[in-house]
Structure formats: C-alpha cells, structure tokens
Amino acid sequence: MAKLALGHHREATDPGCLRAVLAELLLTFLFVFSGVASAMAAAKLGGGDTIAGLTAVAAAHALVVAVMVSAGLHVSGGHINPAVTLGLAVGGHITLFRSALYVLAQLLGASLACLLLAALAAGEPVPVHALAASVSAARGVLMEAVLTFSLLFAVYATVVDQQRRGAAGGALGPLLVGLVVGANILAGGPYSGASMNPARSFGPALVAGDWADHWVYWAGPLIGGPLAGLLYESLFMGRPGHEPLPTNDDF
C-alpha cells in the first residue's frame, strides 16, 4: 500500500539532498528552455497551429524529457515535474519535505528558463498554456488529469517498478516516459495544451503575466499524478528482486 513519509528538516542540510535539489533546478531549467523554445520556434515559423508544428513541439518535448530524466535518474530521480514528485511521494518513494524542496527548485528552474528565453527573443511572446475556446475549465482539468495519469503510470511501470525488481529493462524507462509525453502533447495539445507539469506552465505564465485558467494546470496534474501512483502501488507494483521458479514441492 502507498505510504507517505513526512521526512525531516535536517534533509535540507544533507549533501545528497542538496545535490538532488540542485539537479532538479538545472534539469527543469533545461527541459523548460527547450520545450518553450520549441513552441516559440514553431510559432515563429508559422506552424504553431498546424499538425506539423504540433508534431515538432511534441517531438522536442519527448526528446528533452527522455534525456533529462535519464541524466537525473541517479541523482534526483529526474522528476522535472511537481506532479511526478507528488505522484512518487504518495508511494513513499520520496519524503514530503524533500518533495517540497524539489517543487520549489522546479518552479525556480522553469521561471529562470522563461526569463532567459524572453531576454534572448526580445519582442517575441513566451507562449502560455491556454484552454481551447471550446474547452471549459472543468474539461481542461479532466484532460490534464488523464494525461498526467498516463505519464505517472508510465513512470511507475517503466522506471520505478523496473528499478525495484532490479530489471535491466529499466534503462529504457526515460525514453519511454519521453514518448508518452510526446504522444500526450499530440493528443491533448489542441485542447488544453497538454502541460502535465505545473512547473512547465508556471514559468511562461510568470514571465508573460498571464494567469488565465492557470489553476487548471495545477489541479489536473496534481489529481492525475498521485492517483496513478496510488493505483500502481496498490495493484501492480511487483516484488523486489528475483523470484525463483517453483519446485516440485510447490505443486
């Protein structure tokens, strides 16, 4: 069963925790910089609202997520997303105290990335996640919740569970997680923007000063992520280590 671990403020002075928090800041900075820059490039080239532009943005996010998760897996877990952090916290894989530090680092990294992009592309707007005209706030929350559920389900199945089993196949986890992010952007981008990540939405909103329906990009992911974590932990999480084949005495 899922088990929350509160943690202790002493974690803030632990060298391992400090390295992990710094890694989350840097990894999220790099992820958001590439992700937002890809959306800006698509808009600049006139393809922002076309299937070609959407595909390019989805591919960019898929690639950068795969690389950043892989790069940070051995340091911080490569969360780069408050929804991932909370989704792992409900399974007891990270303390709530460290989770709070991770989220702060992720928000700071995303904000710095967007500030730098705004400075580099002077005069060009930083694109902010927004709901389509036909999508209500409630539908946007549900869309983001479902997309983030699939993301966290993939994280648990291809990374967390594989590591717990000691399976070699877990090395493909970051790539598979990135592919889910790309697929979800293709599926949900025209409706909610397919954020799945409050930090990814926070940075652009802060720089642009546009907070319209911003709460949707917190509510949806922070519902879908933990729900996926609870479900996977309760129903699907495998046993650690090798399970021997049954002997004749077992029949």
Image: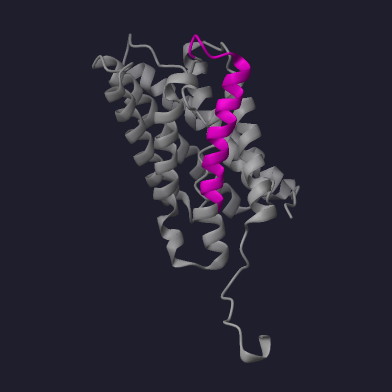
- Kindly indicate the quadrant of the structure image that contains residue 179: top left
Residue at image point 64% right, 33% down? 222
Residue at image point 62% right, 58% down? 237
Residue furthest to the bottom = 248
Front residue of 233 and 36: 233
Position of residue 104 measured from the top left corner of the image (x, y, whole percent) = 60, 33
- Kindly indicate the quadrant of the structure image that contains residue 198: top right
Quadrant that contains the C terminus: bottom right
**In this image, 115 relative to 9: left or right?**
left
Position of residue 75 measured from the top left corner of the image (x, y, whole percent) = 50, 53
In this rendering, the answer to whether 199 lies above or below 242 is: above
Residue furthest to the front = 251
In this rendering, the answer to whether 28 lies above or below 116 is: below
Q: Is residue 189 magenta?
A: no
Image mark count: 0
For the stretch drawn in magenta, what is the main secondary structure?
A: helix
Position of residue 200 measured from the top left corner of the image (x, y, whole percent) = 49, 28
**In this image, 137 relative to 123: left or right?**
right
In this rendering, the answer to whether 106 lies above or below 114 is: below
Quadrant that contains the N terminus: bottom right
Q: In this rendering, does residue 47 appear at all? A: yes
Residue at image point 54% right, 14% down? 135
In this rendering, the answer to whether 140 lies above or below 64 is: above
Front residue of 138 and 3: 138
Residue at image point 49% right, 32% down? 109
- Kindly indicate the quadrant of the structure image that contains residue 152: top right
Segment colored magenta: 132-156
Front residue of 94 and 45: 45
Q: Is residue 135 magenta?
A: yes
Position of residue 155 measured from the top left corner of the image (x, y, whole percent) = 52, 48
Residue furthest to the left = 45
